[in-house]
Image: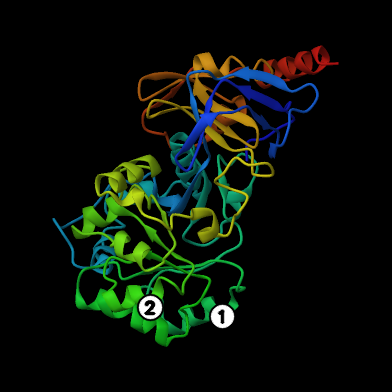
Amino acid sequence: MLLQMNPALHIRGAIVDEGGHAAPRDLFLHERVLPAAPAHALRVDLEGCTLIPGQINAHDHLELNHYPRSSTREQYTSAHDWGADMNARLNDEPFRSLRAHPLADRLFIGGLKNLFSGATTVAHHNPPHRDLWRRGYPVRVLRRYGWAHSLAFASEAEIRASYQRTPPEQAWFIHLAEGTDARAAAEYGRLKALGCVGANTVLIHGVGLTDDDIADAAPKVRGLVWCPSTNAYLLGATARIAAWAAAGGRWALGSDSRLTADGDLRDEQQAAARTGGLGHAGYDPATLIGMPEAGHLQAGALADCTALRGERVALVILGGVPQFGDTDLMVRYPHIRSIRARLNGHEIRLHPALAHRIDRCTLRYTGLEIDALPSRWQMFSFRLRNRLSSL
């Protein structure tokens, strides 16, 4: 992640909103949320902003976010059929060219998508590639987890082996019942017969879960991840979150990738709000993915937060370090020589390490333009002067 030696922060003037409870509150950040202001903390006034915890995206395919939203039919009855259609097109354009980019850069674009939406912690549903935890990756990615793709694209033996080798305290993820047909309705029973329904099982999508499935699974499994815009796009239907919550189930939102979703986690939140789904009990992404230190701003939590101006993301802080934000907010951190940029036409500034990593990426992030970058010597000189001035 893009962290470096930075002073502790004493943030004043903002409204802090955790789970709908909003009130004025000073916040003290270093790598974690601190109980009180440490000596020599940098005081930053964020009056007019609402601070929320860094959001948790419980489902993304981070290497697929540079693809266009794609479908060959107006509507499917099963996402498995969509997957088969897409696999047959992988050597067609634009997929052929987009697949040729380095994996590290494809993963990086997925991280940027999440950072710019205020999602600072992400559960990746695919192999745990090393690049997700290298220095320079934009967000935190769940590191310890088990997974299988689905009952359509993995054998029963592979699914059972994956579940059995996942420690019981770690979440185990699988796409399940992603459809409206009889195949989708039968999948929970098949998974249960394999012995893969337990306290660490996380079901992704769950559109085709029956009433009996929900009654059995909701109090038993770790949770259900809801991806409303992907479900609506492919299937014309989505998971019955109200029924899941009423049965005592835990749930979270996932953005899926831009190959099928509206965009990012904020788009999913808006899609969920349109259905009235955000008001249901049981929303607990931190417990669902197994990261209790994320998703809140109490003492000891990860120092990840997002400042909002209205509904717009105005600043994102990761590990106590501002990564990007509105120009007037980023200049309040004099120890950071932030880089001018425009995101979807809005003037922002980027942390220099983030800007340089974006510049090295072979893929361009749509809607982002960066001004000329300072040289490494200029950056070294700035850090040296800043370090000397603090002595």
Image quadrant where residue 74 sits: bottom left
Image point (52%, 73%), residue name: 199
Q: Residue furthest left?
A: 74
Image quadrant where residue 232 sits: bottom left
Image point (63%, 27%), residue name: 26
Given residues 47 and 362, the one toward you in this image is 47
In the figure, is residue 291 to the left or right of 368?
A: right
Number of marks drawn = 2
Image point (21%, 60%), residue name: 235
Name the mark on residue 255: none
Q: Amino acid at mark 1?
A: Gln
Residue carrying label 1: 164
Residue 203 point in image, percent of width and height? 41, 67
Q: Amino acid at mark 2?
A: Asp
Given residues 387 and 38, the one toward you in this image is 38
Image point (26%, 70%), residue name: 208
Residue 229 point in image, percent of width and height? 28, 50
Which one is earlier in the sequence, the residue at label 2 or at label 1? 1
Residue 249 point in image, percent of width and height? 41, 66
Q: Residues within 10 Å of mark 2 (few under 14, many from 20)?
A: some
In the figure, is residue 387 to the left or right of 332?
A: right
Is residue 152 visible in this depiction of the protein?
no
Residue carrying label 2: 216
Which colour assignment does the render follow?
rainbow
Q: Residues within 10 Å of mark 1 (few under 14, many from 20)?
A: some
Eye-nearest disc, 2 or 1: 2
Given residues 48 and 124, the one toward you in this image is 48
